[in-house]
Image: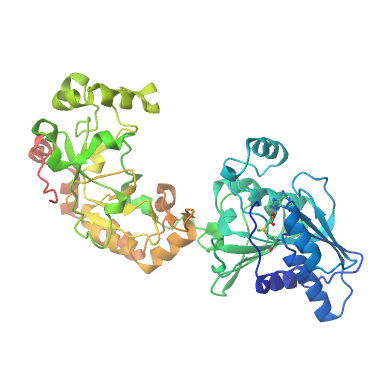
Amino acid sequence: MKGFVPTPQRTVDLMVAELFRDKPPRPEDRVLDPGCGTGAFVSGVLRWCRARGVRPPKLVGVESNPHLAAQARAACGGQASVEIRDGDFLTDPLQEYRFVIGNPPYVPITGLSEREKTLYRKLFKTSRGRFDLYLLFFEQALRSLKPHGRLVLITPEKFLYVETASPLRAMLAQKDVQEIRLIDEQTFGDLVTYPTVTTVTNSPGRGSTLIVFRDGRGVRVSLPPQGDSWLPVIHGSKQRTDVPVLADICVRISCGVATGADSIFVHKHSALEDGLRGFAFPTIAGRQLGAENPNLRTRQAMLIPYARDGRLFEEAELDALGKYLRQPSIRTKLMLRTCVRRKPWYAFHENPPLPDILRPKILCKDIAAEPQFWVDRSGKLVPRHSVYYIIPKRAENIDALCSYLNSARVREWLEGNCQRAANGFLRLQSSVLKRLPLSIELVERAEQRSERDRAHHRPSPNRRKSFASGTYAFEFAR
Ligand SMILES: C[S@@+](CC[C@H](N)C(=O)[O-])C[C@H]1O[C@@H](n2cnc3c(N)ncnc32)[C@H](O)[C@@H]1O
C-alpha cells in the first residue's frame, strides 16, 4: 500500500469549503480526487453539496490500490455522480477538471522501485534529486486543471523551502497561489510533519498570496518567481540589503572539521600514547553540546596532521602520528576516502582552518529542536562536523553575541529561515546563519573601536611565538 494516510473529516471539510469559496460547483463541473484512498474527499464534496441543497458535480476518484478503491465505491453508496477509477494518477492519460482536491501519497524516493524512479524522472519536472511522490502528484494535479480551475492539496510544509521542491515552487509561482495555510501539527498524529493546505487557481499569478500561520495570523506576501525558498518572504524576513547581518561582524561561520574518518582521528585523550598527544586537540561533537555540559567539557581529542598555521605536515614530520596512521588496517581505511583522489592519503577530508578555529568562538549543533549557542572562551576546542562555529571579529563581543543568538528573537528568525530535518528539527547552515539580522546594540558594539581591540588584532611578536609553539594546555574531562 503506497502512502495511505486518510485525511480526518474536519480537515476534509475545511479544504472543501476552501475549494468552493466564491466558486460553487455546477452539476456539469468535474472534480478530481487523485489518490482518493477510501474516498474522504469525494464524501466531503457530497457532504458540502447536501448541506447546501445543491446538485453535486461529477466526482472522479483515482486510486491505485484496488482494495481502497472498492472501499471508496462502497462509501459513496453508488451515487450516479461519482466514479471511482482503479488507476495510476501519475501515468494514466491526463484529463482536465475544474476542481482538484486531495491528499497525495508521501513516499520518499527510497520507497520507489528502480523502474518507477526512471519513469518518473522522464515524466516529471518535479522529479529532481531525492524527490518525494507528493511533489509529482502536485505537478500532475496542476496539469489536470482547466484554465481558471482551482486546486486544494494538503502536503507536508517542506515543499516551501527544500531544494528538491525548487521546480515545483517555480511552477506554482507562475499560477495564482491564493492561500497557503499551515495547519495543526497533530492533524495526522505523528505521521505527517507540518501539514499545509495550498490553494491554487490556474490563472497567471496576481502577485499576492495569503499565508495563514498555525497561530491564526495571516500575512500577504509576493512569492519569488525562480524556485527560491519561500521561507524568507513567508516569515517577513525578506531582508533589506542595508541591514547588518551576522557575517558582517564575524571572521568565520562554518561547519566543524570533517576528517572523513573520525574513528581513526578521534579518541579519548586518556587512551593516547605520549607521542600522539603532541598532535591531539580537544574536540567536541554536537551531541556533547547541551544544558548538562555548560562548560563544554570533553574527553575526546582529535589527532590533527596539520600545523597551527593550517599547513598540512609533510609525511616526514608526522613522527608518532605517521607511525600510527601507517598501520596497514588504518592506512587502507584512509585510502578508501574519496578525498585521497585529490590530496595526500593522511589529509583530512577538508583542510581545517586552524588559525581561525583556535580562537574564542561560539558553537551550536548542526541539527536541533531549538537552536542553542555556547561560548568556547578558551579558543582551544576543535568542533567536529556536527557542530557549527562562529568566530566574531572582536573576541570581547563574544558573550553579547552569544546571548543575542540565544534570544527569542533569533530563535524565531531561525525557525522561519532554517530548513527542517525529517524529524522536524531545525538544520542550521552557514549560509542561513550568515544572513541573520543583527540587533542595533550589537552593531553599535562592533563599531566601537578601542585601543584594546587594535592590540588584539596585532599580537606582539612574543604572543605570536607562544601561539605557534606553546605547549597545549587544556584540561580534559575525566
Ligand atoms: C495520503 S493517501 C490519501 C487518501 C485519501 N485521499 C484521503 O485523504 O483520505 C494517498 C493515496 O494515494 C494512493 N496512491 C499512491 N500512488 C498512487 C498513484 N500512482 N495513483 C493513484 N493513487 C495512488 C494511495 O494508495 C493512497 O490511498
Q: Which residue is drawn at 30% across and 58% down?
A: 373
Residue 283 x, y percent position in the rendering: 22, 44
Res 232 seen here: yes
Q: In this view, does 392 lie above or below 310?
A: below
Tell me if 15 is positioned left or right of 184 in this view.
Answer: right
Q: In which quarter of the image is residue 346?
A: top left
Q: Residue at x 64, y 46 (%)?
A: 167
How was the colour assigned to the protein in this rendering?
Answer: rainbow
Q: In this view, does 292 lie above or below 253?
A: below
Residue 368 x, y percent position in the rendering: 38, 57
Q: In this view of the protein, which residue sits in the foreground, 451 or 476?
A: 476
Q: In this view of the protein, which residue sits in the foreground, 303 or 79?
A: 79
Image quarter for ligand 1:
bottom right
Res 145 seen here: no
Q: Quadrant of residue 279?
A: top left
> In this figure, what is the number of numbered marks?
0
Q: Residue at x 57, y 59 (%)?
A: 157
Q: Which residue is drawn at 30% across and 40% down?
A: 257
Tell me if 25 is positioned left or right of 408 in this view.
Answer: right
Tell me if 328 is positioned left or right of 21 in this view.
Answer: left
Residue 188 x, y percent position in the rendering: 58, 66
Q: In this view of the protein, which residue sits in the foreground, 10 or 148?
A: 10
